[in-house]
Amino acid sequence: MQSYEHKQNNMNKENNMTREIISVIERLLPWAVGKRGCYVNLAALISEFYQTHQNQQEPHPLEPAQMQQVINAYTAQENGDYLYGGWMEDRTHIWKGTYMDAQKKYIHLGVDITAPKGTSVCVPADGTVIHVSAAEGKDVDWGTNVAIQIDEYVFVFAHLARNSFVVPGRTIKAGTVLGSIGTWKRYENGNVFEHVHVQALSSVAYQKHMSEGFVHFDGYGCIGDEEKLKVENPEPIHLLAKFISQQL
């Protein structure tokens, strides 16, 4: 586990988002065009919150409304409009005290991009819809999620509202609206803060999850498996940038 000081030093290490990252995010969320995004290590941010709010006792996870307040405050502090980050992040400080404890399943396998509820989410590159489902339990879950096959990879877009606009088997063009950002209210988006989770999976990893009925598919992997997880779930934004470039 990183020290609190080390996390603090790393929280803003990528605040200078590259044009490539911004371009992909603007394709994914047209709302973001002309807005300022900031990188954040969410685990470090929540760690800082616990350090400065002594009445907040770990391991109990924050309620989604409280986490939303922390995210909104940090976004305003950075003079930003949205936050971006999270791939291969150790989120022990966020999910300690949940079902993830049993397997130490704290490694976040996707990228989270914050945006207000109702914001349209579009596919950034041409692809084929292969899976659409909704999970709306009272525990942390996916909300509505859409899986798109792009070349040899599958990209999952999760924590959406109930209004998905695509169906499996449909080939779609870049810019097609998949749905919109969901809210934790009424457990619509899986009971988490307002954002879209973007995750890339190799075709082998995706088929493995399919064969298991998606029982263990929740966007997280186990501590100690990082090298394998990086291969099975590569950084999604740069990978999307590659496919966008090839399709232009």
Image: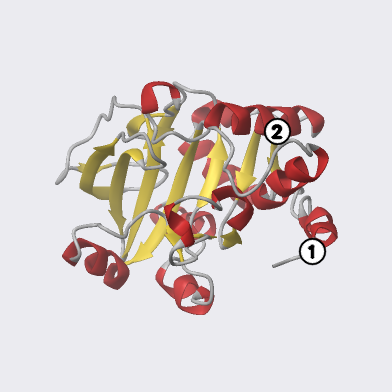
Which three-letter amino acid code belongs to the residue tagged 1?
Ser
CB-based contact (under 8 Å), mark 2 and mark 1:
no
Total residue callouts? 2
Crowd tier of the residue under label 2, counting other residues whose Cα lies within 10 Å: few below 14, some 14–19, many 20 or above: some
* Residue placed most toward the observer, 46 or 219: 46
- The residue under the point 42% across, 27% down is 182
Left or right for 140, reference 127? right
Left or right for 236, reference 79? left
Whether residue 65 is situated above or below residue 173 in the rendered picture: above
Pointer 2: what residue?
Answer: 36
What's the colour scheme? secondary structure
Q: Position of residue 181 (x, y in %)?
A: 44, 29
Q: Helix, strand or loop at disc 2?
A: loop
Mark sitting earlier along the chain (2/1)? 1
- The residue under the point 56% across, 53% down is 96
Pointer 1: what residue?
Answer: 3
Crowd tier of the residue under label 1, counting other residues whose Cα lies within 10 Å: few below 14, some 14–19, many 20 or above: few
Which three-letter amino acid code belongs to the residue tagged 2?
Arg
